[in-house]
Each structure stands twice: as structure tokens, then as C-alpha cells.
Amino acid sequence: MTVHGAFRGNVRDGLGWLNTASRPDPVNVFHRANLPRVGLDDVATAATGVMCSVALYLNDGDTVTNLTFISGGTAAGTPTNCFVALYSGAGVFLGQSADQLTAAWAADTAKTIALAAPVKISKSGIYFAAISVTASTVPTLIGSTGAKPFLIGEGNLAQTSGSSLTGTAPATIATPAFKRAVPLVIAT
């Protein structure tokens, strides 16, 4: 056995594809993402007025100002409310954006939404980035599919919660339900 376990090649060569699949150097462009840029597809995330939150690892010292989600092939139809929010790993509210109200969201479009106030992370770990859209047609988002947690200590990669939400994020992520569709989120 080597330092690389069962892998016999050069680790840098084995991970070379990430040079084109990954995002900019985080030293030069601060960002955190929950998924790589490859293997993504159009996923349905939540019904109208339901919040979808995704696990996102953040580091001590990170300051999150914006959350970006990317719509898939389905645009928002007649939106009336939309917000993004950030929660602790325990599901406690940390901050949210202003209600986007009737702002259009076209298909295949990145939507970067600023939090009302930047959130400074004081402990590295899993946090939850959330989005809720109230519309006649909720946009699909670019993302992936994930398996339900089955090992002790595993959590949901994506989950839904709440109903009839409008422009205000709930104080906690209450009674989260596992969601197979995991939207891509980028924190900047």
C-alpha cells in the first residue's frame, strides 16, 4: 500500500480534469459551491412557496454576501415572491435576502441574490443555503441527484421544508424532508 491507498498513478494526473471543471482559484475569487461543474442536469427542486435547502460546507472566516442558483430549462412563470437564506447546520436562521417579488427569472440563467447583510462564518462545517420561489411555475434548477442518507451521522444533501412561504424565511428549518434533487449553489 502506498500513501495514495489503492491508487497507483500520480494524484495530480488523476484529478487533472478538475482544472477545467472547477471554478476559479478561491484565493483570487472567493466562492464556495456544493457541487462540481460537471455531471449537472435540470432538476425540479420544490413546489411553489416551499423552501429547498442544500448542504454547503463553509470555512471559519468566510463571509457570505451572495447566493447564486442557476435556473434550468424551465423559467419562473409569474413569480410573486423569491428569497434566498443561509442557515446553520442545525437549521437556525443566519440571514436572508430581500424578497425579489415579481423579478423575472429566465431559463438557463444564473441568479445571484445578495443577502440583506453579509454573514461571517465563525465555525467551519456544514451550513444550509436555501431558496424559495412562489410562482405559477417554479423554475427548475441546475443540479444533481443525491442518495438518501443511510449512515449514522450523514445528513440530507437537499431537503424541503415549509409551505405557503412568501417573502420571509422561517426562523428555523422545521421538519425537513429529504429531497433527491440537489441544486447547485454558489456562495460568494
Image: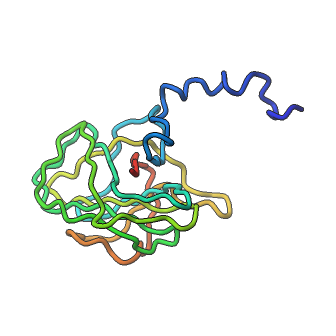
The residue depicted at 48 percent of the width and 43 percent of the height is: 35
Placement of 38 over or under 175, stated as above or below: above
Q: Would residue 18 be found to the left or right of residue 103 on screen?
A: right
The residue depicted at 30 percent of the width and 71 percent of the height is: 169
Judge by depth and name the residue closer to the eye, 96 or 39. 96
Given the current orientation, which residue lies at the most extreme front position? 28
Quarter of the N terminus within the rendering: top right
* Image label count: 0
Placement of 106 over or under 125, stated as above or below: above
Given the current orientation, which residue lies at the most extreme bottom position? 171
x and y percentages locating residue 42 in the rendered image: 34, 39
Placement of 168 over or under 132, stated as above or below: below
x and y percentages locating residue 99 in the rendered image: 19, 65
The residue depicted at 87 percent of the width and 31 percent of the height is: 2
Residue 163: quarter of image = bottom left
x and y percentages locating residue 60 in the rendered image: 56, 61
The residue depicted at 16 percent of the width and 57 percent of the height is: 135
Judge by depth and name the residue closer to the eye, 177 or 25. 25
User: Which color mode does the image show?
Assistant: rainbow
Given the current orientation, which residue lies at the most extreme right position? 1
x and y percentages locating residue 104 in the rendered image: 13, 49
Residue 123: quarter of image = bottom right
Placement of 111 over or under 7, stated as above or below: below
